């Protein structure tokens, strides 16, 4: 496949609907994308199949037990290769944005470590993890949903995963701006008409209108995005007028 993800998780079943449905399901079925899971529980040897352990220093909560976790990471590496990029999903990581997604889309084999409980031993991060990634400033109960968020965002940039109908290059954030509003039938909904320009058939006028909508929305809703953006001459002119 074009893109391989190895996912280290105590809950591999969570990935079944993700890999079976919709755009991602099609990408997997057509062989463009492949997702293999590695469960630390499969690398336990005690009668209770223990995967958690107590934190040194005490306090509430447990950590992932080191040996089953590192055995699962090594199993993933034995499939993806020693050069696989290892990412640990955690709120302490670098916040993921579309530029980060584009960078990750250029990597062929990626191993995603999903934490549970209070997380993993810091030395496992130091020894095995190349990058720590957060999907936002809130705390989830495990890294599985963040791993799926990352894989979804990356997979849709793999050539052929999106049909030409919904090309990734036309998406919101590809130019660093929010998306423009969209309209479909009926032409009048509860007395509200679709913006006239969209019915004009003038494709250049429609393009300019959409760009203007994107600029105004971004300025109103996410002015922070405009700050670190190099606007094109046309974008700056439309925003100034
Ligand atoms: N694990 C728990 N919360 C997370 C977040 N916000 N991002 C990435 N991994 C997480």
Image (tube, rainbow, N blue to C red):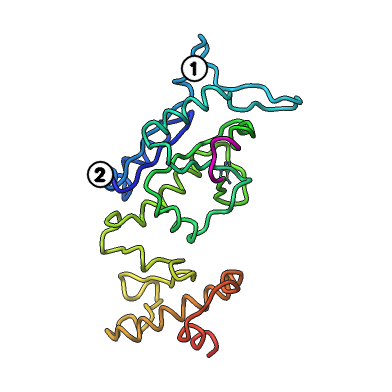
Looking at the image, residue 150 lies above or below residue 40: below
Q: Is mark 1 within 8 Å of ligand 1?
A: no
Magenta residue check for 127: yes
Q: Nearer the viewer, residue 127 or 131?
A: 127
* Residue reaching furthest to the left: 30
Magenta residue check for 160: no
Pinpoint residue 44: horizontal percent, then vertical percent.
49, 17
Q: How many marks?
A: 2
Pinpoint residue 5: horizontal percent, then vertical percent.
39, 41
- Kindly identify which numbered label has been placed on residue 44: 1
- Kindly identify which numbered label has been placed on residue 31: 2
Q: Nearer the viewer, residue 75 or 197?
A: 75
Q: Residues within 10 Å of mark 2 (few under 14, many from 20)?
A: few
Q: Nearer the viewer, residue 96 or 209?
A: 96
Structural distance between the alpha carbons of marks 2 and 1: 32 Å
Residue occupying image coordinates x 50% and y 37%? 113
Residue occupying image coordinates x 26% and y 59%? 163
Q: In the visual, does 114 lie left or right of 211?
A: right
Looking at the image, residue 177 lies above or below residue 55: below
Part of the protein shown in magenta: 126-131
Q: Quadrant of the N terminus?
A: top left
Q: For residue 181, what is the image quadrant?
A: bottom left
* Residue reaching furthest to the front: 82
Q: Residues within 10 Å of mark 1 (few under 14, many from 20)?
A: some
Pinpoint residue 109: horizontal percent, then vertical percent.
39, 43
Residue occupying image coordinates x 31% and y 64%? 167
Looking at the image, residue 207 lies above or below residue 57: below
Pinpoint residue 62: horizontal percent, then vertical percent.
65, 26
Q: Nearer the viewer, residue 229 or 10?
A: 229
- Kindly identify which numbered label has been placed on residue 8: none
* Residue reaching furthest to the top: 47
């Amino acid at each position: 496949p074009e893109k391989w993800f190895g996912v280290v998780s105590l809950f591999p079943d969570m990935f079944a609907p993700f890999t079976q449905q919709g755009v991602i399901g099609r990408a997997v079925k057509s062989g463009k994308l492949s997702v293999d899971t590695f469960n630390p529980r499969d690398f336990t040897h005690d009668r209770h199949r223990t995967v958690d352990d107590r934190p040194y220093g005490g306090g509430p909560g447990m950590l992932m037990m080191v040996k089953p976790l590192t055995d699962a990471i090594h199993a993933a590496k034995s499939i993806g290769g020693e050069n696989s990029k290892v990412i640990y999903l955690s709120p302490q990581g670098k916040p993921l944005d579309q530029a980060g997604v584009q960078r990750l889309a250029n990597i062929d084999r990626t191993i995603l470590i999903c934490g549970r409980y209070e997380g993993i031993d810091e030395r496992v991060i130091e020894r095995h993890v190349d990058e720590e990634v957060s999907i936002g400033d809130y705390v989830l109960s495990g890294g599985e949903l963040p791993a799926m968020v990352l894989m979804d965002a990356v997979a849709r940039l793999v050539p052929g995963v999106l049909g030409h109908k919904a090309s990734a290059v036309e998406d919101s954030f590809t130019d660093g701006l929010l998306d423009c509003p969209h309209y479909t039938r009926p032409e009048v909904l509860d007395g509200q008409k679709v913006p006239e320009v969209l019915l004009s058939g003038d494709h250049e006028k429609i393009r300019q209108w959409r760009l203007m909508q994107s600029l105004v929305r971004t300025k109103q809703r996410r002015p922070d995005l405009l700050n670190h953006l190099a606007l094109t001459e046309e974008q700056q002119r439309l925003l100034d007028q």
